[in-house]
Image (cartoon, grey):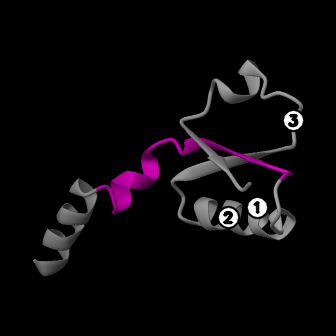
Amino acid sequence: MKTAVWTVLLALAGLGPAASTAAPIAALIIDGQNNHDWKSTTPALKKILEDGGLFQVDVLTTPPKVATSASSNRNLPGTAW
């Protein structure tokens, strides 16, 4: 009984089995500039986001200008600058 209650509560909270059926959120990390080690932090950040199963992450490195087509289909823009 306790297991069933926890399963229902977690599913309602979006943390249980029901959450795995939803499509991942498309995320974009834009990196390539600034005064920190973005070559190391970007892969770590991408791994953290994707390991949770909620995000599908693409990386765009130092674009001269962010193209509308590259950023328009993302739900969560991010930066490692």
Residue type highlighted by circle 3: Pro
Residue depth check, mark 2 versus mark 3: number of the one nearer the observer: 3
At numbered mark 1, what does the secondary structure look like: helix, strand or loop?
A: helix
Q: Give me the C-alpha separation between circle 3 and circle 1.
A: 15 Å
Tell whether 20 sits left or right of 57.
left
Q: Residue at the location (80% across, 67% down)?
A: 36
Question: According to the image, label 1 marks what residue?
Answer: 42
Q: Where is residue 48 in the image (x, y as percent from the top left)?
A: 62, 67
Q: How far apart are marks 2 and 3 (CA)?
A: 19 Å
Residue at the outermost bottom position? 2
Residue labelled with disc 2: 45
Q: What element carries label 2?
A: helix
Horizontal placement of 66 versus 8: left or right?
right
Q: Give the range drawn in magenta.
A: 14-33
The amino acid pointed to by label 2 is Leu
What is the C-alpha distance between the residues marked 2 and 1?
Answer: 5 Å
- Is tag 2's residue or tag 3's residue first in the polypeptide sequence? 2
Rendered view: 43 above or below 3: above
Q: Which residue lies furthest to the top in this view?
A: 68
**How would you rate the neighbour count of disc 2 (Cα within 10 Å): few for under 14, some for 14-19, many for 20 or more?**
some
